[in-house]
Amino acid sequence: MEKTKSLLVMGYEVVIGFETHAQLSTQSKIFSRASTAFGAEPNTQACAVDLALPGTLPVMNKGAVERAIQFGLAVGSHIAPKSIFARKNYFYPDLPKGYQISQFEIPVVQGGSVEFFLGDEKKSVRLVRAHLEEDAGKSLHEDFIGQTGIDLNRAGTPLLEIVTEPDMRSSAEAVAYAKELHKIVTWIGICDGNMQEGSFRCDANVSVRKPGEALGTRREIKNLNSFKFMQQAMDYEIRWQIEQLEDGHTIQQATVLFNPDTGETRAMRTKEDAADYRYFPDPDLPPLVISREWVDTVKASMAELPRAMAARFEADYGLSEYDATSLTQSHALSAYFEAATRVCAQAKLASNWIMGEVSRRLNAQDIGIEAAPLPPETLGTLIQRIADGTISNNAARQVLDALWEGDGTHVDAIIEAKGLKQMNDSGALEAIVDTVIAANAKNVAEFQAGNEKALNALVGQIMKASKGKANPQQVNDLLRSKLAVAT
């Protein structure tokens, strides 16, 4: 990684575009009634249509079209009122027809964009298209017996191929885009997003160039099925291409694979262009016609989209765009936030605690918000106790630890048992403040001379004297009031 950074300093710009295959969540295939269930015995879910037996004809799956419309609506695309299916010709053992039914010149979804944050910087990646197509089968290489088998269960599985413009300029940005796209397709329910089972597969087109020059020759990294490997593969490919150019070599357009064991990419074959596939309209499928009424019906049936929900969180709860976007990463997370906020009526505090302390614990255990041992209503009660001054932030973390570990289920009971209530007796607190002021004349003088840090030292002494039970804000206000009078 560090080597990549140093090479980029030499003046190369990274250019990345993505092609993502999202398996649509239909129960049957795109052109047949065969099941799409994962894990069946090889060749038990391939019917006559999938096998391309003579006399069979494809029939369009309406559910696949509806899912494509949903995606287009989610990313602000144009839904083509009329699109065409084409035959993409190539010859592989796992493609029994000798061609793949896809879309070429007129796809069903055109344009649109995906917006996301990289750190606290907002990014947007333009989409070229999203088109419907069928998946191929799978070649199984059993090296220990020197044989190769063909499993056609996946043949005909409905896919939505989502293609971007080459808008990304780093591997980190590309991974952030892929995560956002994954969120969108799972949020609207058109894909289960299971990368290990092949439901969400990404191909990264990577090239490098000197700034201002024409786009460099790209190499396509195929079938990246984890976000971790995705970044590793692109970082290696970027480094390799720059080294080749620095050594005076040219980059040959190719399809490459990433080996996670070695951390390297290797060329699989020279990359084909569209002309090599000899696209032509499929004579067995009429044009796909989508009426405005159909689009409106699909739109009306969709749940609130992430973008719309984030905008609502900004308007209704006064959250920043970054916070609102972070809290709408999944249905479960947004529901958790709203449930906690209904209890405490402190949206910003709830956002801070969910994205901070709660997320830190989830990441440490590698679990999602759905598996959090802390109900959102309980978190809401905890936040309420911070807001009304019952406990400090530090004490709240101790209560959260106890709740998380199962050492109690009631916020107030834990506060009482651990003696975490803040000091609310103003007379007792004032007495402590007076004592600390009298005993720390030097810090008092420094603060009154303009040294703000001296006040922190006084606050620390008061917190120590109160055994951490004083309200820090109350202490701060009281100190400033008394020291202002003293001057």
Image (cartoon, helix red, strand yellow):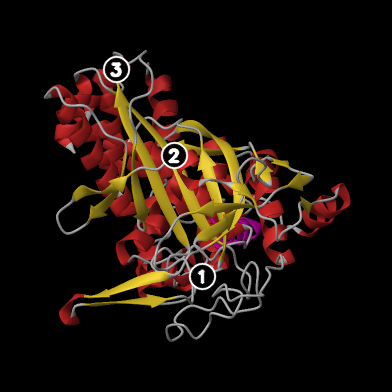
Q: Residues within 10 Å of mark 2 (few under 14, many from 20)?
A: few
Quadrant where the image shows the N terminus = top left
The CA span between labels 1 and 2 is 23 Å
The CA span between labels 3 and 2 is 24 Å
| Range shown magenta | 330-343
For the point 33% across and 15% down, the residue is 211
Labels 3 & 2 near each other (Cβ < 8 A): no
**Badge 2 amino acid:** Asp
Name the residue beneath numbered marker 2: 273
Could you tell me which secondary element the residue under label 1 belongs to?
loop
Quadrant where the image shows the C terminus = top left
Q: Judge left or right: residue 462 versus residue 159.
A: left
With respect to residue 380, does 6 lie above or below? above
Q: Is residue 426 in view from this perspective?
A: no
- Give residue 219's position: percent from left, percent from top: 32, 39
- Give residue 428's position: percent from left, percent from top: 41, 49
Give me the disc on residue 299.
Answer: none
Name the residue beneath numbered marker 1: 155
With respect to residue 118, does 47 lie above or below? below
Rendering quarter of residue 273 = top left
* Mark 1 or mark 2: whose residue is earlier in sequence: 1
Name the residue beneath numbered marker 3: 210
Q: Residues within 10 Å of mark 3 (few under 14, many from 20)?
A: some
**Badge 1 amino acid:** Ala
**Could you tell me what secondary structure mostly forms the magenta stretch?**
helix
Residue pushed farthest left? 247
The CA span between labels 1 and 3 is 42 Å
Q: Judge left or right: residue 479 versus residue 84.
A: left
Rendering quarter of residue 11 = top left
Could you tell me which secondary element the residue under label 2 belongs to?
loop
